[in-house]
Amino acid sequence: MSNIDQPSGFKTSWKKNLYENQGYPDNYTDISFLEELKKNVNMRKVPFTEAFLGSTLVTQQLCVIVLFTLNFYCIYDEKISSEVLFLVNCCFTVFGYALYGLFYSVAIKRHTKALISFLILGYLLSPVLKTLTESISTDTIYAMSSFMMIVHLVFYDYGVKAVIVSSSLSLNAAVFACLCLASRLQTPFDSFVLMSFAVQCFLLCPLVLAKIKNNHLILVILLGLCIFGLFKVSHIMTVLFVGAVVFLNLLCPFLFVRWHAYKDNIYGPWDEAVVKGFEWDSKYT
């Protein structure tokens, strides 16, 4: 459309009426067209504190992935026996179930049946899981697992309504990565222990963590466990992890708050009409 004034020779003033032939050309734009222009309607300024607390949810899930990877490393490199790790995981499961009972109504009988079914089926199918990807090279397995964990982080539900959020895709990506890693362990029982821990990390933990968001104590504990475990494995990985945490929790919120000031949304007569809610009169039914 062209921005031109009212053409000379037209005596009638221009009106925004699609079904009336006013004699104006199709590309005519009246000077009153932009009178209804609005900018940044209902835009809320996000403080740094709120952005920082939101970023801690990403760090929290990153810590869960790091703890799972450390668990895999301990089993793969035989740092700790699978039996000991299985007992420790069982203790954490009992503790997590107790926390779960504080926020949700629990059906102990039904949950116990589900637990027993999972343990039996998981143990019986562990030989299949171990040989599932034997024909794939180890480097490819590690690359696929890393990529799937990134997909898990990107699509994870952090409590924000967005198109990109997909809990099912996030969970499936994590499970796929766990299956790939489980196939590289020595025995079927090792694979069973790792998959049991994967269920704890990516299926059961989110149920509890969703109720205790922005809990600084939980985040500090997870960060401490991750830094301690990575320090025992590799100093370089520890530095990279700390750098990633600083980037996620300090630099990203700072850049978000700074760049949010440049956000400029415009609203005008070209937007689609929004039909607001109304009450239907019973006399028309």
Image (tube, grey):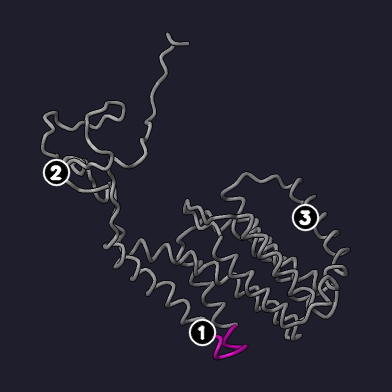
Judged from the image, the secondary structure of the residue bearing numbered disc 1 is: helix
Pointer 2 or 3: first along the chain: 2
In this image, 88 relative to 128: left or right?
Answer: left
Range of magenta residues: 230-240
Query: Is residue 260 left or right of 221 when viewed as pictured?
Result: left
Relative to 137, residue 47 above or below: above
Taking the spot 60% from the left edge, 55% from the top edge, the residue there is 167
Q: Give how far apart the Cα atoms at labels 1 and 3 are.
A: 37 Å
Q: Which residue is mark 3?
A: 115
Q: Which one is earlier in the sequence, the residue at label 1 or at label 3?
A: 3
**Residue 231: image location, x then y, percent:** 57, 87
Label 3: how many Cα within 10 Å (few below 14, some 14–19, many 20+): few
Task: State the residue in front, 143 or 270.
Answer: 270
Q: Residue furthest front?
A: 9
Q: Is residue 32 left or right of residue 60?
A: left
Residue at mark 2: 5
Structural distance between the alpha carbons of marks 1 and 2: 61 Å
> Crowdedness of circle 2 by 10 Å Cα count: few (<14), some, many (20+)?
few
Q: Is residue 269 magenta?
A: no
The residue that disc 1 covers is 240
